[in-house]
Amino acid sequence: MHASSDIVAVMVGVAVEGPYSYRVPPGVSVARGSIVAVPLGPRLTHGVVWGPPRDTIAHNRLRDIAHVYDVPPLSEELLKLVDWVARYTLAVPGQVVRSVLRSTEALDPPKPVIAFRSTGHEPEKLTPARLRVLDALMDGMAWPKPALLGATGVSASVVEGLERVGAIERLEMPAPPVVLPPDPDAAIAKLSEAQQLALEQITRLDPHQFGVALLDGVTGGGKTEVFFEAVADTLRAGRQALILLPEIALTNTFIDRFTRRFGARPAEWHSDMTPSQRAKVWRGVLEGTVRAVVGARSALFLPFRELGMLVLDEEHDGAYKQADGITYHARDMAVVRAHLCNARVILSSATPSVETRNNANVGRYEHVLLTSRFAEAALPNITALDMRTEGPERGEWIAPTLAREIFGALDRGEQALLFLNRRGYAPLTLCQSCGHQYKCPDCSAWMVEHRFRGVLMCHHCGHEVKTPKSCGECGDTDSLVAVGPGIERVAEEAAKRFPNARRVILSSDMGSHSHLRERFTEVERGEYDLIIGTQLVSKGHHFEKLSVVGVLDADLGLAHGDPRAAEKTFQILTQVAGRAGRASRSGKAFLQTYHPDHPVMRAMVTGDREAFYAHELTAREAGGLPPFGRLAALIVSANEHAAAMDYAKRLLASAPQADGLRLFGPADAPVSQIRGRYRVRLLAQSGKDFDLSGYVRFWLAMGEKTTGNLKVQVDIDPMSFM
């Protein structure tokens, strides 16, 4: 693809079905994967050269490529990943290309750093400020301007004055790398015997071949040290590594641990970064100067050239599912990307997803078990408190047994954690006089009271109003009551019961990421006695002094008719209970439940997770649910309920017949209205070897086209059923 008369296909980074043809101007050379700017309508847009043109078009009807960026072309495996993701998720390829070209600032060459060094010429006029600058430059080294100003405390005009009289000269230096390369031998971990065996099992997978290992170990079992050594093995083999984390709030402690192990910070990739930080990381990954990245799920689309290992920490976590735009699951896409570039994958979790556990059971993944806790810490003792017989007094939420245990922990100078996965003060506000319930005007969800901020808020669309003084329906004052507990209401009860305890609330709506990181650091330092938190506290934190954990509503996840409810509940309860007794002290966890005989509760109390996985896999197989079958959800939404339902019925009527396929619906989604749009669901279920993506694509092409404000969103392998 180098001749001047070439025509090439360019996949533009906008939501289009396929590539467009462009002329390559004379004297310009491009290859498959070259990043270019091309005219599209009245403006220029970014795109990637995809290959030869799909169809023959007369030269005079084509437009020229406007600019070829001076960066290496994207790798063949990344272009194949774009095609695969588009085909599997039913996204249009241009949309996936946009996920790859996320940082367009990265395409321009990095700006050089302005530096100064001494010429040896002494100026006639020497002020104290000028002397400080000349003293700093006496070593003959060139100093970057910001460093020189910082070290001498002078203003920029002093430096410019010295440059004018020829005492110092200006140089342009290349921009420093965004991070230093990690050293695989900087601080090799002293592993326990169990960790060493786990590492050997992982490193038996060839560093230049595709292979997946499930690193399956109890919370506090030292999984991070094991996969760090596997990352070191990959870096020694000359390949790049990517570690994905489910939550940005977790990154700080993790990055500190990485830095201690490898002697340098990893590059980071998440939504808290500035555009210029992103640009440097993106370009460094493409040019190969960045060897290790720690990031959120979107880091999966970074332009690695020598990717040799992908680690997904907490692989079971729901945050790996992208729900807006392209609906993909980062775990599944990580395995696909590794397959395309012959890399190894480590899926790490104390509570693996049922799909991953099944892949390990059937030998598709290497099953690496870490069953003992690191540094002799004991696993917590777990008790179910039957709320029917041992529940708290009316209007209270902490059972007497749990309250006694918390008093005991506080007396011993230890920490206790109260967990409730519900933000705000109360999930429902109603008027005692007329029964009016406060609902979001744009969604079918109840407004949640946030008493600390004095607002009622919808957790689906973010709509909020000031908490009213009187009922909006009957006008009665002081008649509004909170129904059910939220995290703030539990904090209020805790303040009354444990007035001398230093308390902290940890919830995702309690401030910025940096604010939350400060709170976590304070908890780790032992500055609080009682932690009251939502699922934010369940992952990745190491609280040395924590010995009692109370889960106030262990049944919360089991309610909504979700086929994954038992699995999600088991995972979050295990993660929360696992926070107790992580150092040398043994911990206790209490689950307040109305269903002590549920398989989830029985597995928790007996510590028999094998029984839980066996029960769950049997139930899934009987129902033809993943991993033994496949699901695809189609959400039809519109501004009017009748329009959404009528279209969904017509869509169902147009569905092609296929063996082994079952269709359900249409039915209103459990959250039937979000942001003023009504939502109706259809569900397709098939065997696991059926091409469900291909079927849904064909079905939508056969069906009636959407018009007006009607929209159809497809979710292959749905994780949420709301």
Image (cartoon, grey):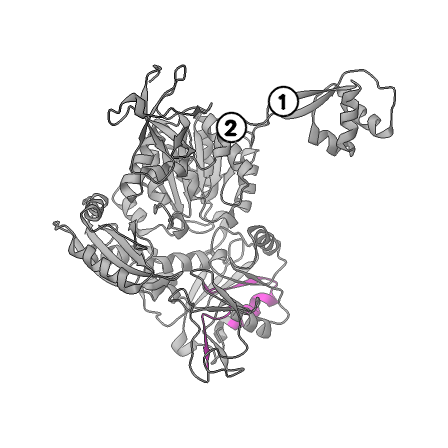
Q: Quadrant of residue 87?
A: top left
Would you name the residue on which mark 1 appears? Answer: 173
Q: Position of residue 333 (x, y in %)?
A: 34, 40
Report the residue at 31% width, 30% height from top: 20
Would you name the residue on which mark 2 appears? Answer: 108
Q: Which residues, given as a range, are shown in magenta?
A: 403-431
Inspect the magenta stretch and tell me whether residue 410 lies in it.
yes
Q: Nearer the viewer, residue 391 or 317?
A: 317
Quarter of the image with the N terminus is top left
Q: Nearer the viewer, residue 260 or 518?
A: 518
Indicate the amino acid at tag 2: Asp
Report the residue at 27% width, 61% height from top: 643
Q: Position of residue 707 (x, y in %)?
A: 27, 52
Alpha carbons under labels 2 and 1: distance apart: 17 Å
Inspect the magenta stretch and tell me whether residue 620 lies in it.
no
Q: From what the image shows, is residue 692 above or below residue 450?
A: above
Q: Nearer the viewer, residue 506 or 379?
A: 506
